Image (tube, helix red, strand yellow):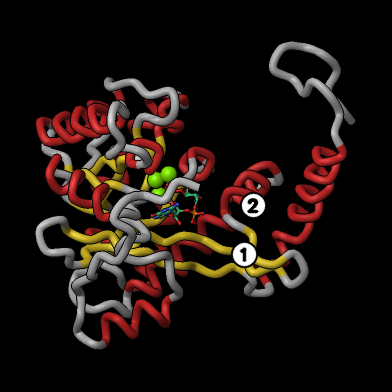
Amino acid sequence: ASKAGGRGQYRFYSSDLANDARRQREIGEELADAIVNDELTMHYQPIVRSTDHKVIAFEALMRWDHPELGAIGPGTFITVAEEINLISRISEWSLRRACTDAMQWPGDIRVSVNISAQQFFAGGLPSLVATILDETGLRANRLELEITEGVFMGESSMVDAIFAKLTKMGVRLSLDDFGTGYSSLAYLRRAPFEKIKIDQNFVRGCCEEGNPNAAIITAIISLAHALDMQTTAEGVEAMDELRLLLGLGATQIQGFIFSRPVCQDVVMEKLASGDFIYEPVGPAKHRSD
Ligand code: C2E
Ligand code: MG
Ligand code: MG
Ligand code: MG
């Protein structure tokens, strides 16, 4: 049903919204089965070191190969999972899948797993992480958790306690999507983040004349540097973006310019050849379309 009137509410009822709502309900109903039926998959995207383009970590990005609806992105189904109380099972699945796959990778290449604010507070995250590390045998310092600013909306003593448990285990923490939510610089003091991820929102357009993104990126990198934190620039697609970010001192780069997210088989092929270096391949400038 349409929401009646009111500021910030739907101004008119459209059949698209109806279809959206129906689709959301369908997705919710099938998500529980999807976990059991093995329809969820994890893809991995390299995060490379700025100095030599050597892969130091892969970000785990979840996908759902739905038998009828096709590939569904995490943007759609994570929110649904949160609404219907499936989020703990999603956390367990994603951590187990990512840590199991990372155990196959050579050396000390890390895996970086996204944890939504709801997952962060779902209860027992630190003990779930400990269980999965124990079960898979992955060393804690090879696991990075990507947390968003949203967690700071929670009760502060609880937030601090969860961070304390995770860091005591030796798990690394990154602040994802920095600057895109209701950020406060004070948050940076609250948790021992090793790394700030510069959102692709700031990377997009950063090379255009008069675009403020380059100034924002400069400020984030300088802040991170002063706080002894690393920076990963996300969504880097074009050569001019790569050049600018390297020049500004981003310590790590992630984006289609090095690789799209790929399945574990493709990761293993690359690493098995002994090649840990990614070559940048992309347009000279970002194609705006
Ligand atoms: P994120 O954590 O900020 O992940 C980066 C997103 O940017 C990914 O989208 C990735 O595919 C995309 N990306 C990377 N490089 C480029 C590029 O050069 N150009 C463009 N246009 N995009 C690029 P994806 O996989 O659709 O994931 C979207 C969001 O869904 C993620 O944003 C993350 O917040 C969430 N997500 C993904 N997997 C999981 C998961 O396992 N658990 C949770 N809680 N959230 C997840
Ligand atoms: Mg992320
Ligand atoms: Mg991000
Ligand atoms: Mg993002």
Q: Which mark is residue 77?
A: 2
Residue type, label 1: Trp
Q: Which mark is residue 179?
A: none
| Residue 277 location, quadrant | bottom left
Q: CA distance from mark 2 to mark 1?
A: 8 Å
Q: Residue at x 19, y 44 (%)?
A: 244
**Quadrant assignment for the N terminus:** top right
- Residue at the image point whose x is 45% and y is 74% from the top: 263
Q: Amino acid at mark 2?
A: Phe
Is there CB contact under 8 Å for labels 2 and 1?
yes
Q: Position of residue 118 (x, y in %)?
A: 53, 40
Q: Is residue 63 left or right of residue 84?
A: left
Of 240 and 94, nearer the camera is: 240
Q: Which residue is mark 1?
A: 64
Q: Label 1: how many residues lie within 10 Å, few (<14), some (14-19) or many (20+)?
A: many
Picture coordinates of residue 194, whole percent (x, y): 21, 44
Question: x%, y% of residue 5?
Answer: 82, 14
Residue at 18% over, 45% down: 250
